[in-house]
Amino acid sequence: MLWKGDLKMHKTYEMVIGLEVHVELKTESKIFCGCSTRFGQEPNTQVCPVCLGLPGSLPVLNEKVVEFAVIAGLTTNCEITEVGKQDRKNYFYPDLAKAYQISQYDQPLCKRGFVEVEDKDVSKKIGITRIHIEEDAGKLVHNKELGTLIDYNRAGVPLVEIVSEPDIRSANEAKLYLQKLRGILLYTGISDCKMNEGSFRCDVNLSIRKKGDSTLGTRTEMKNLNSFSSIQRAIEHEFTRQIKILETGGTVVQETRRWEQDKNKSVSMRTKEDAHDYRYFPDPDLLPIIIENTYIKALEAGLPELPDAKKHKYMSSYDLSVFDAEQIALDLEVAEFFEKTLACYDQPKLIANVLISEVLKLKGKTEDIIKISPVDFAGLIQLIDTGVINTSISKKVIDMMWLEGLSAEAIVKRESLQLITDEAELITYIKPVLEKYDKIVKDYLGGKDKAIQSLVGQVMRVTHGKADPEKTLKLIDALIKEI
């Protein structure tokens, strides 16, 4: 709910946002040991002395982690560090077995990059401060009967942390940045970026200030948000919360907060630490990371076509709008689906329209794979293009295709969804409508041209949307003129 005065105050203040994105890398083994990284296994079955931090155990860096981190840097326009090191970040928390996390402090692998986003055809570069590697912590499992349990399977899973500059000024900008970043990483294959499994999650650092001010306000951090909708809601809620505090004479406290999605609010967890509180120092068990230029060039040469390149290709080759091209190119699965459908039926604009308006909506609800084959989707597009069904009917057909796995042709035939195009049959529906709605007919005859659309709508209603709209309109006009 909006606080009284929110609308006015939201225009007075601006939000300043920096995001810390934690991305689990798609390696087969953990960052410092040979334990599996497979998700969803029985608790504490993928652990060893190294990832449990037992005395005498020694970490050995997984080279694939460095490779994936450099790829993340190259695809986000970062400078790659020639000499990096790993540091111990010291703090106690039950899911951190060693009481410290191996991370990177002052010599991250990648720095000074950017990601370009587009909002309403306006481009903006969001700066990236750094990308560093680190190990993930375990997971706390809260059980009503047994209390809080710890599963250490996730401990030692390799992460890259991608830290943005405080360049973001709205919840929507944050969403666009995260969608673009996730799309880039999916294209490279270095992470599956499954938000529901925690392999792509985000911490939001937010402060507010009066518009026109250059001084940053006191920031808060909201931890471990893992869906675009919760990130947007959390940002908007925190923005309003901080405005309320300042406008009622209070002081914003630098703290870490947790977003409670079910209650649609954030709660305080602890006061926010600064870097010196972690007592960083170089890990004495790990050697420096030397990255040679030939290594960088080799990785650069193997990079795939990225979302922006695909977007520009779709715009130039298929005349798609910036918005349509961006929506398709952002998700690798969607882009591949679009291209495979296009190979079956050459109508790019129609494919794009139906794909964005209907298929992405279904995919977004479940964060699932597309449950329609490109061949079957091409069949649906052909039915629309040739006038067998219209886009209104296609929505019902797509829903059934998604659930049942049948072709569009089979569903249209089974449900008798073909458009009624026979003029004699259409007239049998139109005449009763004209008799029933004679006042609307008189309005049309009296010069109210838009009244005919209401009559078309009534015919569509009695035919359950199956009347051919264009023929229906022409027949209504002709029959009224005969009156």
Image (tube, grey):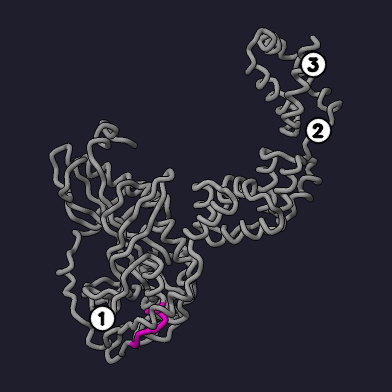
Three-letter amino acid code of the residue under disc 2: Thr
Q: Which residue is mark 1?
A: 85
Q: Which mark is residue 421?
A: 2
Which amino acid is tagged 1?
Lys
Q: Main secondary structure of the magenta part?
A: helix
Asked if residue 416 lies left or right of residue 57, the reply is: right
Q: Position of residue 452 (x, y in %)?
A: 68, 19
As for residue 65 lying within the magenta part, the answer is yes
How far apart in space, not on screen, are marks 3 and 1 (Cα)? 82 Å
Report the quarter where the C terminus lies. top right
Q: Are marks 1 and 2 in contact (CB under 8 Å)?
A: no
**Extreme residue toward the right, this view:** 424
- Position of 309 relative to 213 (above/below): below
Q: Which residue is mark 3?
A: 479
Q: Local crowd at mark 2 within 10 Å, few (<14), some, or many (≥20)?
A: some
Depicted 439 relative to depicted 229: above or below: above
- Point out the stretch of residues depicted in magenta: 60-67
Rendered image quadrant of residue 136 = bottom left
Residue 334, position in %: x, y?
57, 57
Mark 3 and mark 2: Cα distance apart in space: 16 Å
Near-viewer residue (1 or 69): 69
Considering every residue shown, the one lying at the far front of the view is 316
